[in-house]
Image: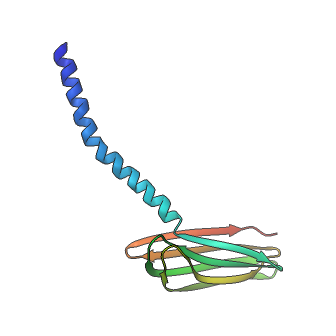
């Protein structure tokens, strides 16, 4: 019986040493995903029967890359699609406005998608609002 307990303790210690780095990597990956989710944002600002959509990038360090901002609108007055894209350079700690679109907000629905590429990583965020 004492041999089994010693063997079990040794096995437990080995497993703990093996699994510790795996847990640390999983925690870092989860932290990076939440940080990346904060990178892009679509801000909607209503006013005077209109809504302004701003495509934003906010990073903790200086970053540059490319973006595509795609907006689909439908409502009483018909439908429209707008796509804008280009390069960007964002300063650390500041939100960079990549693109803006103003739309009639009465009786309309819109879906806006911002795709950002920085190096070999892609990020995407979407905002969708129903008709008033």
Residue 40 in the image, given as x and y percentages of width and height: 54, 71
Q: Residue furthest left?
A: 3
- The quadrant holding residue 100 is bottom right
* Frontmost residue, 79 versus 59: 59
Q: Is residue 28 above or below residue 68?
A: above
On the image, the x and y values in percent for residue 14 come to 22, 35
Quarter of the image for residue 81 reads: bottom right
What is the basis of the colouring in this image? rainbow
Residue at image point 18% right, 14% down? 2
Please state, as top left, top right, bottom left or bottom right, where the N terminus lies in the image: top left
Q: How many marks?
A: 0
The residue sitting at the front extreme is: 93
Tell me if residue 28 can be seen: yes
Expressed as whole percent of the image width and height from the top left, the position of residue 79 reads 73, 81
- Quarter holding the C terminus is bottom right
3 left or right of 88 in image: left
Q: Residue at x 79, y 70 (%)?
A: 131
Name the residue nearer the viewer: 31 or 71: 31
Q: Is residue 117 left or right of residue 21?
A: right
Left or right side of 18 for 45: right
Name the residue rendered at 64%, 69% in the picture: 127
- Is residue 80 in sight in this rendering? no
Q: Residue at x 48, y 75 (%)?
A: 92
Q: Position of residue 11 (x, y in %)?
A: 22, 30
92 lies left or right of 48: left
Q: Residue furthest top?
A: 1
Q: Is residue 99 above or below residue 109?
A: below
């Amino acid at each position: 019986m004492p041999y089994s307990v010693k063997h079990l303790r040794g096995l437990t210690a080995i497993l703990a040493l093996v699994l510790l780095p795996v847990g640390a990597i999983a925690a870092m990956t989860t932290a990076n995903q939440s940080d990346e989710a904060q990178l892009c944002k679509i801000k909607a600002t209503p006013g005077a029967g209109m809504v302004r959509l701003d495509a934003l990038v906010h990073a903790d360090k200086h970053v540059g890359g490319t973006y595509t901002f795609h907006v689909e609108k439908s409502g009483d007055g018909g439908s429209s699609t707008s796509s804008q894209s280009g390069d960007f350079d964002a300063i650390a700690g500041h939100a960079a406005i990549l693109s803006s679109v103003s739309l009639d907000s009465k009786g309309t629905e819109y879906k806006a998608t911002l795709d950002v590429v920085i190096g070999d990583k892609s990020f995407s965020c979407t905002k969708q609002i129903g008709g008033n």
